[in-house]
Amino acid sequence: MSFVITTPLYYVNDKPHLGSIYTTLICDAIARFKRLSGEDVVFITGVDEHGLKIQRTAISKGVDPQSHCDEISNIFIKSWKDWNITHNKFIRTSSKNHESIVNEFYSRVKKSDDIYIGVQKGWYCVGCEEFKDNPDNSPTHKCPIHMKNLEWRNEENLFFRLSKYQLQIENLINEPSFIQPKERRNEIINFVSKGLKDFSISRTNVSWGIQVPDKQNHTFYVWFDALLGYVSALSHNMNNPSLEKSINNGWPADIHIIGKDILRFHAVYWPAMLLSAGMKVPKKVFGHGFLTREGQKMGKSLGNVLDPKVLLSKYGKETVRWFLLKDITLGSDGDFQNKRFVDIINNDLANTIGNLLNRTSSMSRKWFNNRVPNNELLNDDKTLELYAKEAVFTYKKHFNSYEIDLAANTVLNLAINTNLYLNEKQPWKLIKDENNISLVSNVIYNVLESTRIIGLLLLPLLPDLSKKIDLQLGSIYNDKISWNEQLNWGKLIKKSLLPIPSPIIEKLEHE
Ligand code: MSP
């Protein structure tokens, strides 16, 4: 049994922004954690390439939609590489495999008698690719997310009988584990309680989409097409892909991680579509919050969009990863403030973790012949061992409940406690008396061992920094031994050589 985790499939109207990086980094940390814990992980990401929004973007650039999609999709692929994302599947919804799976899915839904022809009237937001309420029925009414005028639609579309699934969806969303976090679940319960309305799944005014097989001039509604990307991703690298084969290759997903604005699609429309096709529903949908910058919504018109490429080249990926994973509670909104970002990196990574490692390894090298001390003599000081055991337990519990920030803070707390222990023991004073040598060797061993565990716990969160910590400790990580096993106390080899320390991270300057 594999663990299947997905990011949303990002629209290719533009290159990745910090919001897309955020979700992808979260999924990456979870995927790494699950792999290290011994699970077989399928990590799906990709791009949503059809629909009016993309069609219009291509037209405005004067290029055909496919070339536009190729260009932006390649930027996404390159960007995921730059951010060290460990996905196994990257789905493009303009691919042939995807198209055939959408068609097969559609015929299943049709067989369930869930498709009919009707007239769709309403106000549409092209940015959201969604019909919206327009209480004053005004042509200048703006979508609250995109701040653009809604557009009136009155056309013949194919409809999906969502209303038929009212009871099943109610039962599903009432299961406490299905929607996380709790507050978001309540929003959805409230929405569903008003009664589900059938929704249109085809368009006659959009050429850039998958042609509906039995309905000329109709393309599939971009969301009907895109959600299926999660399934067609499972057919990646498959010869003669089919819906059945994709399902057998890992469906249902264990978790969809998405932003709060698209929760309804994932927690209501998507499960109903799957039920109609006789498929299993995803096990969990997690709706995370939005990122703002210095307290303001990020937007092109506001001119305050944080370009992840700039962040990456200026600060490096580990620092941004740490900030986004440690400082923002998954589910709540988060604010990117430059001053706070610099402070957090300097305090947590450079001072608390980096200095701890450097000064301890320097002391060890100086007093124990460039090596980890030999503490074979009685080491009955269990203070750090107990802290570390507790930290490993708490960290795993948090990670398994998707409390990534709490997991990261657990590692940081272990580093804080290790610093306190070192300052309290003051080995630099003890060493002055020869009789204290075994005491000093125990203290230094305990601190180095705790740092080794800190490095291991950082592996899913900050893979590169974790490797640097390991290098400083003499490259003792062994990928032939399970991570869980290596997390046990006492694995640091006595008397092993320690390389000359160098800072694992440079301090950042305030702007
Ligand atoms: N294409 C659809 C998803 C289809 S999934 C089958 C889509 N794409 S999107 O590119 O517009 O958004 C992708 C994700 O980015 C969404 O989860 C959205 O919530 C998220 N974010 C967009 N702006 C964001 C922030 N400012 N902060 C955090 N996430 C944000 O919707």
Image (cartoon, rainbow, N blue to C red):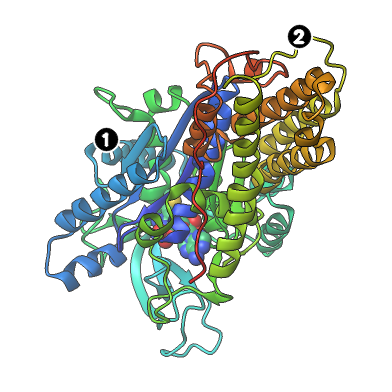
* Residue pointed to by mark 1: 97
Task: Residue 349: give x, y in percent of width and height.
Answer: 59, 48
Residue beneath the point at 70% across and 32% down: 396
Residue beneath the point at 40% across and 40% down: 84
Q: Residues within 10 Å of mark 2 (few under 14, many from 20)?
A: few
Residue type for callout 2: Glu
**Res 201 visible:** no
Above or below: residue 446 compared with residue 410:
above
* Residue pointed to by mark 2: 376
Q: Residues within 10 Å of mark 1 (few under 14, many from 20)?
A: many
Residue type for callout 1: Asn
Residue 414 relative to residue 337: left or right: right
Residue beneath the point at 41% across and 74% down: 124
Quadrant into which the N terminus falls? top right
Task: Residue 252: give x, y in percent of width and height.
Answer: 52, 32
Residue 494 sits in which quadrant? top right
Task: Residue 489: give x, y in percent of width and height.
Answer: 73, 19
For the residues bearing labels 2 and 1, Cβ distance under 8 angstroms? no
For the residue pair 319 and 419, the one nearer the viewer reads as: 419
**Secondary structure under the numbered disc 1 in the rendered image:** helix
Residue 408 sits in which quadrant? top right
